[in-house]
Image: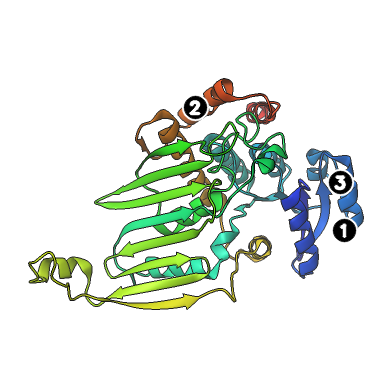
Amino acid sequence: MDKVRIGVVGIGVIGEFHCKHIVKDASPEFRLSAVCDRNKDKAQAAKAAYSVASFRDPQKLFESGLVDAVIIATPHYWHAPLVIRAARAGLHVMCDKPLASTVGPAKAAIEECRKRGVVLAGMLQHRTRPIMQRIKHLVASGEIGEVFRVSMICSNWFRTQAYYDSGAWRGTWDGEGGGVLINQGPHHLDLFVWIAGLPRRVIGLLDTRIHNIEVEDTANFLCDYGGGKVGYIYATTGELPGMEQFMVCGDKATLIAEGHKLRIGRLQHGLRDFTMGSITKLADEKVKNDAVWTEEDFSTNKGGQHIEVIRAFARHILRGEPLVATGEDSLEELELSNAMYLAGYKDKPVTLPIDEREIDRLIAKLQKTRSTGKGEGIRSKATRDLRKLLAEG
């Protein structure tokens, strides 16, 4: 193989976006070869726009011989079944976020790809943002010292009620299977885990604060890493004006990222040594360990482009170069969000890794008790398809 032939499954907003940018990129290493959508008009329109083969049945695309790899861009309840079907057809897979609604199906998808010897990559493009790569380097290199606090505020995802009313699956338990954590949150939960690691325990609150929807629109969580290291996550689709802030506090420095700017406050002396060695006694006496602040501006190089992840995917298939994110990486953010659902809706601290059966029982209960039927049971249909696939082996 000298050029990866890619098929896109699901020609909604994000699937159309992938198609357009693959064609626009005109890479010598990959090309768009086929598209698939159950909606006849969408499939035909994509066929005409990109001069590629079109399908309405994903299985027929997988077995067509026209593609070497696929991008799964359907609503997320179909992700795991389609990843498994593609893997069984011998195709490499790039899956949009989240890999599944719960960790059990996600693990099944990862295992199927491993068993079939195909690549499973996650579309976690925020890892390519230079500002986040800079934070990752500063933390991983030890430049800010031992980390003791991480905070993430994501309130720049405001959604109107009309947004939730625009699709049968939006804001429902029997369709979407969750709210801000499963829809808007995965990219930032991934950044949180990528930089800070998975906590050992989560405690928090989930609320439907402002919208007329079945699922949560606001999440507040405390993450316990042990040894006094903590994390805090706040996410909502019900706040204006919103903001994106990521803060990491360490023994040697503090990082504050807001929008496209990163402020770095470097201490003159390590915090732990200074705390134990300082002779300052009075509470109101000025402590002589001032931070020196610098600012880095990433507004001219925002990054975070989907095409960067697709390029890395193709190069991994062709030459074994690193992926931006693996299937296992996608599982970690899902592990965190599932733990947050358990903690929030069962009002208890939850230890990670979670019990796969417990989260499935919780989602099933929420669907049974809170669903209005708007989602038309489409998530249950996808779940039945997955169970059938797993039973077939």
Q: Which mark is residue 43?
A: 3
- Residue toward you, 112 or 198: 198
x and y, in percent, of residue 370 in the image: 57, 24
Q: Quadrant of residue 161?
A: top right
Q: How is the image coloured?
A: rainbow
Q: On the picture, is 269 further left or further right than 299?
A: left
Q: Quadrant of residue 318?
A: bottom right
Q: Residues within 10 Å of mark 1 (few under 14, many from 20)?
A: some
Q: Earlier in the sequence, mark 1 or mark 2?
A: 1
Q: On the picture, is 170 further left or further right than 110?
A: right
Q: Quadrant of residue 272?
A: bottom left
Mark yes or no: residue 83 visible.
Answer: no
Would you place residue 125 above or below residue 59 in this image?
below
Residue at the spot of label 2 = 362
Callout 2: helix, strand or loop? Answer: helix
The amino acid beneath tag 2 is Leu
